[in-house]
Image: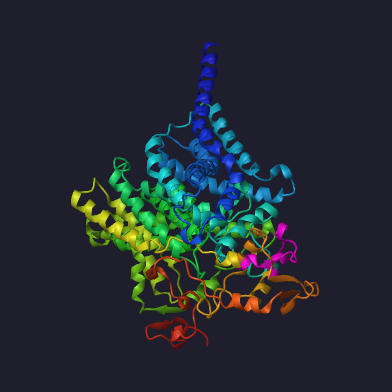
Amino acid sequence: MAEGVRSSTSRRSAFLACLGALLPLVILGLPAWLASSLDGRMQLVGLRIDPERAFFSLDTPVLLYAVLPLALLGIFTLVTAPGLIMARALARGPCDLDRLVVNGMFLGLVATAGYGALGGWMHDDETFRGAGTLVLAVSAALALLVLKTSAGQDPPPGSGGRAFGLAVVFPVLLIATLSAPKIFWEQATGDGAHSFEAARLLLHGRSPFFPRAAGAIANYPGVSSMLSGLQAVPFLSLMGETIAAPRLTMLLNLGFLAAALRLHLAPVLRNRLSINLLMWGALVATYLALGWSASYDAYSADLALPASQDLLLLAGVVATLDAWRRREWMRFCGFCFVTLTVSPGAALLLIFLPLARVLASGPGTGAALVRLVFALGVAFALHAGLAWFATRYWGQEAGAEYQSRAMLSRLRYLDFGDPRRWLWLIPGGLFPLAVYFRLCRIGVEARTIAGLGALSFVFYGLLIRTNLHYFAPAMVLPLTAWLAARKGPLPRRSACWSFALVIVAIGLCVPKEPRIATVSRDLGQTIDLEGVPGYEEASAESFLALDALYAFFPPDHDHDVPDKLVGGSSLAWNYHGRRKVDDPEALLGLARRGQERPGWEVVQVSGDWAAAVEDRAAWMRLRRSTPRSALGPAFLRVPRERLFMGRGLEDGPWVVDLKRLARRMGLADR
C-alpha cells in the first residue's frame, strides 16, 4: 500500500516537474497572439516609409523596437515548441540546450511535414486551419512527453538557459528587428514568391508539390527540397498569407545554425564571450552576403529563397558533422535523411564527406570509414524510399528542377579562369580560413570538416554557371572546423587579429545604400489580375496563366534586363498584383481571350489568355525604365551572363566543355 502511494506520488511529482519545464515555453509563446495582426501593422507603417531611408527608421519606434521583437519571440517559440518538447521527451541523460535545440529543430521539421501532409488531406475542415495545425502538433508532442512521464521516466534537466538566450536567441531577435524593413517592406523576387507559393500549397491543397499542369512553377519544390518549403507553413498559419512568413524562416534557421555550431565547441568554451562574438561576426557577414546578394533578380535578393534554404542546409550539415564526430550513428542517419530533403546541395556535401575523411587521415581509416559509408548509404536509401512514397501518396510527381538531367547540364562547362570567386570566401568572416594554415596541428575531425569546405569550394568554383549561394558551405564549414579545433581560450594576439578580420569582412559585406527595392511591387501594382480565377484555391490554371505576363515585361534572364528594360518574375508580379496598396489604377491587365476590358489594346495572346494595356505609351515608358539595384556590394554580385549562361560564355579561353571532351575520348555518343 505504502509502496503504491510512493509510486503515485513519484509520478505526480514527475508530471508537475514536466509541466514546470513547459511553463517557459508557454510564457514565451504568449506574444504569438500578435502574429495575426503583425504584418498588417507593419504594412501600414511601410506606406509612410521612404524606401531610400527604410532602415533605422524612428517613425514608429514602439512597434519596430518593442512590439516586433516580442511578437517574433512568441512566433519562434510557438513554431519550435513541438520539436523542442519531443526532443526533451526522447532525450536520455543530461541534455544541454544547444543539443536540445538542434535535435528539436529536426524533429520539428519532420513534425511540420507530417501535420502539413495531414492538413492537406483535411484542408476543407475549417477547424484544422490556421494555428490549429500548431495546436495539434504541440498537443501530440505534449502527449508523448506525458506518456513518458507517466511511465516513471523524468525528462532530463536542461541547463544553460540564460547563456543560450544571450548567445543565440538575443542575436537572432536583434538581427530580425534591424532587418524588419527587408522582411516586411521589400519587394518579392521570383524565388521569394516561389517559396511563398510552395508553403501556401498546403493551406489550399492536398500536396506539397505543384501539379505539372501549373507550368514552370512545378519545378520546385521536389523531394530534395520539400522541407525548405514546408518549413514556412506554420508561419503562414500564424501570420496569414504574407511574404514575411517564409522570410522569417531565415532568421529561425540562423539561430539553428548558431546552436549547431556551438555543439562543435568544448563545453568549457561554449559560453566564452570572445568565441561567441567571433562566431556571430562570421554569421552576420554570411547573412548579409546571402540576404542581400544571392539572387537571380536584378534588383534585390530575398531572404525567403535561396538564403533561408541555404542556412537550413548548413544547419543540417553542421549537425550531421557533430553526430559523426560523436559516433552517434542513429542520430547521424536521422540528420542526413532530413538534410537530404532540404536542398539538393546536401547530397553533394554528404558524398564528399568520406573523401574529405580519407584526405584528412589517409586511406588507412579502416572500420570508421566503412561505418561512415554504410550510414550514408542508409540515409540515401531512406531518401530514395521517400521519393517513391511521395509520388504514390500524393499521386503526382515532385518538382524536377534538381533532377539528374538539370544537374548534368550545369556540370557540362568548367571555367578555370575566374579568380573573383576567391572573394566569395570573405563572407565567412576571414579568420576561420586560418585553419587551412595549421592543418597539421588540428585533429582529424577538424581537418575533415575543413577539407569538406575546400572540396565544396573547388566544385562550385569551377562551374561556369554559378550563383553566390552555391558558396554558402565554403563560407560556413571553415568556421565549423575552426570551432572544432579550439582546445582552449583564444590567445590575446590571435583574438585581436580575428576580431580585426571579422570586422573587415562585415564591413565589406554591408550594403552600401540603406534602401529597399520596390521594383516588382511597383510593376505588380499596375497589373489587373481579377480576370485570372483559381488563385485562392492554388489551382494549376492560375499559375499557368502567369506566363502571359511576360508580354508586358521581360523575364529575369533576358539579356536587356536591367540595362535597357525593366524585368523580373511573373510570380513576384502576381504576388503584388493580388495585394494592392492604396487601390492604384490598373494600367495592364490579364484575362481570358475575348474577355478583356472594353477599349484596352491586346498586345499578345498566349494560349487562352490575353495581355492587354490601357495606355500603350505609358506602358512603354514603364517597360523602358531602368530602376536602381538594391543588391549588396559589387564584389559579391555574380555577372548576369554567369547566372543565366550568356551567349558566347562557353567559348572562353579557360573553359572546358566536358561533353565535347568526352566525345573526343570516345566516352560519349555524338
Q: Residue at x 25, y 47 (%)?
A: 487
Q: In which quarter of the image is the N terminus?
A: top right
* Tally of numbered discs: 0
Residue 198 in view of the camera: yes
> From what the image shows, is residue 438 above or below residue 460?
above
User: Which percent across, then down, holds residue 106?
Assistant: 50, 48
In the displayed orientation, state which residue is furthest to the top. 1
- Give the extent of the magenta segment: 523-545
User: Which percent across, then down, holds residue 485?
Assistant: 28, 52
> From what the image shows, is residue 46 above or below residue 592?
above
Return the residue nearer the eye: 55 or 318: 55
Q: Is residue 526 magenta?
A: yes
User: Which percent across, then down, holds residue 662?
Assistant: 45, 83
Occupied quadrant, residue 611: bottom right
User: Which percent across, then down, holds residue 278?
Assistant: 31, 51
> From what the image shows, is residue 27 above or below residue 577?
above
Relative to 70, 274 lies left or right: left
Return the residue nearer the eye: 108 or 390: 108
Residue 454 in view of the camera: no
Occupied quadrant, residue 223: bottom right
Return the residue nearer the eye: 228 or 42: 42
Q: Is residue 255 magenta?
A: no
Q: Which residue is drawn at 34% across and 58% down?
A: 506
